[in-house]
Image: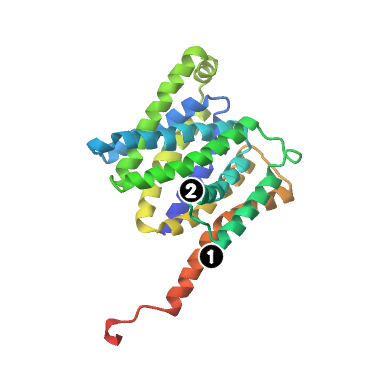
Amino acid sequence: MNIILAMVATFLWGTTYAVTQATLPGWPPLLLGALRALPAGIILFAIKPTFPDKGTWRMVLTTGLVNIAIFFCCIFVMALTLPSAISSVGMMSVPVFAMLIQWIVMKQRPSVIQIISGLALFGFAALLFDPSRMHLSLLGLSAMLIGILCLICGSTLTQMLSQKLAWWCVLTWQLILGGLALLLIALVHLSYDPTAYINAWQHLSGKNLLGLFWLCILNTAVAYSLCVWTLKQLSVVEFTFAGVANPVAGILCGLMLVGESYTPIQYGLMIGMIVMSLLPQFVKSYLKYRRTSKHPLQPLSEK
């Protein structure tokens, strides 16, 4: 049941791109990021009010800026400039970048299976993002790269902060502080380039409100709450297997909501990227299972 809840969370995250394209086209990414993060953070705070300790505010703010302000802005730039399936599947490249950063910065050499999966993932991505096969926005691809780096750095910051504060407090306040930062930047942007903001307000429709409800309540408040809950019940390795629902959601929603379609070869490359991103964790879990099954713990009476 817990893995199903985790898959619900990652599936909801995978709908971000298609829902944005279908219901909020032309909206400023800064505004969308603020409207997704800040209300969700306030709702979570109202459910369970918590405050960071006095000496942790600076770290909470940094985590909120990386994990929410910059990352959400990149997500919505991708949503408005790249196809939904491409955005979702492209974010599955995170393991390769994380592996390279650990290898170069932290001198942690990856395992053989990680190297093989990384090279295969890079090859599939090179073929899928080949400009001769598909014309993609340079701005969107740049936002994807920055978003991947934010995800890696933000996860590290979150792990460090979670050793000092409760998970719920970290989640709530990074949404609130990140949302406030996005709102302030959006107001500055509004002051010298108001066209997109005015157009969004003047043409506000029921479809827009439905999209905002989905992004703020289901995509953020509910999904992040499920994430917090399942991480208490599952190991990080078990939770990573639920990540397969993210690109599946991107592909399905892109097909149903915005009419995206690809060639069989392109779908095959997407599936290949998904499989390669999950393979190292699958092999690690399988080897761990083999070891524990061969050497089970003996009862005390037999020792």
Residue designated by label 2: 10
Percent across and percent down for residue 139 are 61, 30
Q: Secondary structure at mark 2?
A: helix
Q: Quadrant of the C terminus?
A: bottom left
Above or below, 62 against 302 in this view is above
Nearest to the observer: residue 58 or residue 212: 58
Q: Quadrant of the N terminus?
A: bottom left
The answer to whether residue 269 shows anywhere in this view is yes
Nearest to the observer: residue 248 or residue 191: 191
Q: Which mark is residue 283?
A: 1
Task: Rate crowding at label 1 as few (under 14), some (14 to 19) or many (20 or more) other CA atoms within 10 Å.
Answer: few
Under mark 2, the amino acid is: Thr
Residue found 39% across the figure and 58% down from its top:
234
The image quadrant of residue 83 is top right
Under mark 1, the amino acid is: Val
Percent across and percent down for residue 117 are 60, 57
